[in-house]
Amino acid sequence: MNGSWAPSTKMPGGLPSNPGAAGGKTAKIFTALGPVESQDTFGSTGKQVADPSALRLKDGRVRLISWVNPVGLRTATSTDASGTTFVADATVPLAVMGGQPRLVRIDASTVRLFYVSAGTISTALSADQGLTFADQGPVITTAQAGFEPGTLSVVKKGRLYRAYFSNLEKPGERAPRIMKTATSTDMIHWTVGPQLSIAGSHPFALIDARGKVALYYAADGAHGYGIYVSTSKDGITFGGTKYVVAGAGDPDIIMAGKSAWIMYYGAEVSPSTGFGVFAAKSIGDVIP
């Protein structure tokens, strides 16, 4: 990796050394649309645009907030409702340096942002549909999580908000992956636990009207590195794992019509451009 060696997460013979590592069948849920953001979108030369999170605006367009190396979080807005061509916004969304953003719409104008900074998951609020955010500070610390956490993905299950997060991914690190859940009544005060039996990183959760949860996440599993999905009836015990997108990570999914969905995720655009954000549209049930 980048000219140096790191321990593999797999044992000889291809068996995963990380308990709960992803397996399952290949599922045709999404079809690729290609790259939608790169360093060129933001006039950067850092060769890394990653960790997208999407928001459908009132006029139908899509706003993405992403990590842009080396400047931090930046937003870009699509030119139309298809959400496939983006132009960088002139604003800086957050005054503090943070990473792994995740957006949650509160109402027509208010948006909550979760992000990671200095070993904590923090939150901020926006009153202008995700262009600028006022920081509200930490909500889950390393001590609470039991490890240095990545950011949250949140669904409403019953009367509680249920969140999912993993240990923080770091460039060049091949540490075993851990995912946990947490619950809250206000998205500010969280009760952490339990740990999930499946293992992966940067999870994104969807929930249907019956309360079934689909968790998309990156893992180095039986089919190789990529995005997998597992499902749960109670939001805690997951199974039915399926392989969704090869060689990709950092999934984030929004609706693209009454029954269609669009997924944004990270992958390499080209050696000269580096890593960027891709889009894929649904061709199957996103909560399989």
Image (cartoon, rainbow, N blue to C red):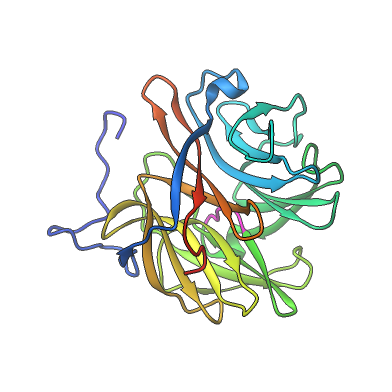
User: Could you say where residue 253 lies in the image, as x and y percent from the top left?
Assistant: 58, 53
| Left or right relative to 56: residue 19 | left
Task: Tell me if I can see residue 216 in this picture.
Answer: yes
Which image quarter: residue 189? bottom right
Residue toward you, 189 or 206: 206
Q: Is residue 150 magenta?
A: yes
Total numbered badges shown on the rendered structure = 0
User: Could you say where residue 217 lies in the image, as x and y percent from the top left?
Assistant: 46, 57
| Left or right relative to 45: residue 255 | right
| Left or right relative to 226: residue 160 | right
Q: Does the magenta stretch include residue 46?
A: no
Residue toward you, 211 or 111: 211
Q: Is 220 above or below relative to 214?
A: above
Which image quarter: residue 121? bottom right
Task: Tell me if I can see residue 117 in this picture.
Answer: no
User: Could you say where residue 281 lies in the image, as x and y percent from the top left?
Assistant: 51, 48
Residue depicted at 47% across the width and 79% down the height: 237
* Residue at the extreme left of the image, as rendered: 13
User: What's the magenta region?
Assistant: 148-152
Residue depicted at 27% across the width and 28% down the height: 3
Secondary structure mostly seen in the magenta stretch: loop
Residue depicted at 29% across the width and 35% down the height: 1
User: Could you say where residue 78 lies in the image, as x and y percent from the top left?
Assistant: 67, 34
